Image (cartoon, rainbow, N blue to C red):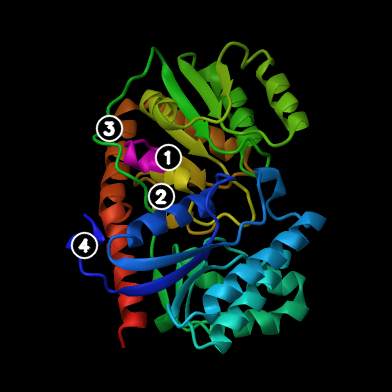
Amino acid sequence: MSKDATEVRGAVIVVGQVPPPVHGTTVMTRRLLEALSDRWQVTFVDKGLSDTIQDVGRAQPRKIWRAIKFYRRAARVIAAPSPRTCVYFLSCSAPAFVVDAFVIRNLLRHGVKVVLYLHGIGFTLLAERRPSLEPTIARVLGGASAVVVLGRGGQADVARWVSGDCITVIPNAIPDPGPPTRHGASGVCCLYLATLDRSKGALAFLDSAERTAPRVPEARFVLAGQCPDPAFGRELQARCEREALRGRVSILGPTFGAEKEELFRSADIFIFPTQYPFENSPLVNIEAMSYGLPIITSSIGSIPDQVSNDGNGFLVDASSVEQLSSRMERLLRDPDLRTRMGTESRRRYEAGHTLAAFSARWDGVLGAVVEP
């Protein structure tokens, strides 16, 4: 529906980064812009400092010049008479947070209402590691007209600085792929689809597969995703050559579009044993939910809002190979349990992670800030 046929409720600035690189925050920046496009007049300011996954969170000299250019772009928008409300994707890594703090201070000085959108978890950790930044964290979070988090983990992360009545939970959302249907070959397939990185759990997945594979001969294992570190990629390949896994594991590169959809529809179990310290509400788990898959994943961040033990999957300590492999084996051996948990995954997706629900929640937050 076009703006001509829809009431435009107001004008907003959105400060964030769209892909590249492709990761949860950049994907959700684009998704927010799409969600707001019908009912809000949006001015987008791209704050992108990184071009690749390898660059994210790293201090690099070239980012200084990019930060200066970003500040100038933002200053031009802030100086304009409209919009007077800004949705700001706030970073929790130290260098990016400092840049954000300068821009947000400028927004507030010019009377712009700021809605902070917190995608990462790590503000408490940032204050502990950099005590000198805590007053700035308090000012930035305390100066917001509203704070949007992805789940209970994000809410707990900022509770010391933001009162509960200022926080709104808006879960991540993805397009609906349609009713779950399996396209699987013979055997039972365990899928890991995320960045092939130690902190994201790629090696933990293989360690657990190595323990499980001899006990479940029909099991197959697939890893798909970008591998930023070639040395780690070689380590994964070497692990796959061990006797228990030889011929049982496929390692694929980044997958998108129809290829990605086919991977999900060919899988029977989704496994994401992440230990990434800033993990919050991973989109890959929501994608697995939308395809009706049972999920084995970590009990960190806001993941317990996505997956519940014995509901639509299992929450595990990702550092425990024994715990992860035992849950893997249980699902591999029990097709009825896979069906029950997969059905619950799809129900949870439909109840809370659709694009329609995402748009409606943001419409409510912005309406409350803009219209009074």
Q: Earlier in the sequence, mark 2 or mark 3?
A: 3
Residue matched to label 3: 180
Between discs 1 and 4, the one toward the N terminus: 4
| Front: mark 2 or 3 | 3
| Front-most of residues 6 and 349 | 6
Q: Is residue 291 left or right of residue 155?
A: left
For label 4, the residue is 4
Give the mark nearest the N terminus, 1 or 2: 1
Name the amino acid, label 1: Ile
* SS type, badge 3: loop
Label 2 neighbour load within 10 Å: few <14, some 14-19, many 20+: many
Q: Amino acid at mark 2?
A: Val
Marks 2/4: CA–CA distance: 40 Å
Rounded to the nearest angstrom, the CA distance separating label 1 from label 2 is 7 Å
Q: State which mark lies toward you, 4 or 3.
A: 4
Element marked by disc 1: strand
- Residue 30 appears in the rendering: yes
Query: Which residue is the site of mark 1?
Result: 295
Up/down of 133 relative to 42, above or below: below
Residue shown at 54%/87% (left/top)? 110
Residue 183 coordinates in the image, percent (x, y): 33, 20
Asked where in the image residue 251 lies, by quadrant, the reply is: top right
Camera-side mark, 1 or 3: 3
Residues 43 and 264: in front is 43
Please name which of the two marks, 2 or 4, marks the residue nearer to the observer: 4
Q: Secondary structure at mark 4?
A: helix
